[in-house]
Amino acid sequence: MAKRIISAAIAIPVGILIIALNNELLYYIAMALISAAAVYELLVATKYLKNRTISALSLLFTAATPFLFWVDALKENIRLIYFGFLMILFTVLLFKHEKARFEQVALTAAISIAIPISLSSIAFIRSAFPQHATFLIVYTMISVWISDAGAYFVGTLCGKHKMCPKISPKKTWEGFIGGIVTSGVLSVIMCFSYEFIDTLINNGAHTFRVNWIYLTALALVISVLGVVGDLTASLVKRECSVKDFGNLLPGHGGVLDRFDSVLCAAPFAYLMFQLYFPVTPI
């Protein structure tokens, strides 16, 4: 428990600082570093890191991916860049076929593309909705993580029915429901708090309205997607015979252990904000 508290005491202020500064480039740098760390941990867990050439290409491309969507000139040629990356990987496979297998290269390519794009959705939210980015990003991340916390406490107190005993023995249906409810309740609180802060800043006047019904319903779905990401990561760890993906955050595991639930939730939130923006000016 002490290690968890110390890790949180370091990680949380860093996250708060990034959100408080609300700098677009800083978000992309943060997502590049987190993505590279997550892919590295997955390469270690699968033991694919042994192929240094393919691993180096994977990590370099992972770290570069967020910026491919930030720089307009690169974004316009994103398909060609991805095609080139795949061609380079499979060309290396031709020369390293005695040490590397096709499935290793295919998995490396998949995680090098999927993980950074998924995590970069947080930065995409900052770029697409700069005026309300802080609220939307905090809402998205809190909806995921508070659901996980709610599921843990409810499951610990009254969890009896196992959810996926062969994948994650500690998860229960009671915890699953508790996590969803916790996420929904906190969503309502966040929405009205954001409106209240707006009135304080503008001397009692409202400048926008938050569709709390939409965001509460969205939080419930985000909570479920967070569980999907978490269970998928648990399945990978079980197949790789590892308890945690890393030890960068003592007591919490690795970076991927903390962000696995974000992998499905963040892209979904970004998509839904594009389909319908929940903050409207008055």
Image: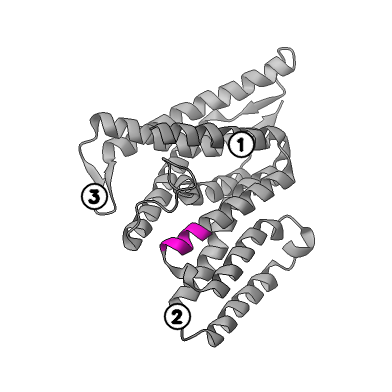
Are there few (<14), some (14-19), or many (20+) residues within 10 Å of tag 1?
few
Are there few (<14), some (14-19), or many (20+) residues within 10 Å of tag 2?
few
Give the residue pinned by disc 1: 14
Q: Is residue 202 above or below residue 30?
A: above
Q: Quadrant of the N terminus?
A: top left
Give the residue pinned by disc 3: 165
Left or right: residue 88 versus residue 111 is right
Q: Quadrant of the C terminus?
A: top right
Could you tell me the amino acid type at mark 2?
Arg
Percent coordinates x, y for residue 154 in the rendering: 31, 31
Magenta span of residues: 40-45
Colour logic: one colour
Percent coordinates x, y for residue 146 in the rendering: 45, 33
Give the residue pinned by disc 2: 101
Front-lying residue, 275 or 38:
38
Could you tell me the amino acid type at mark 1?
Val
Residue visible at 69% across and 73% down in the picture: 80
Mark 2 and mark 1 lie on one chain; the one further toward the N terminus is 1
Q: What element carries label 3?
A: loop
Left or right: residue 205 versus residue 40 is right
Mark 2 and mark 3 lie on one chain; the one further toward the N terminus is 2
Q: What element carries label 2?
A: loop
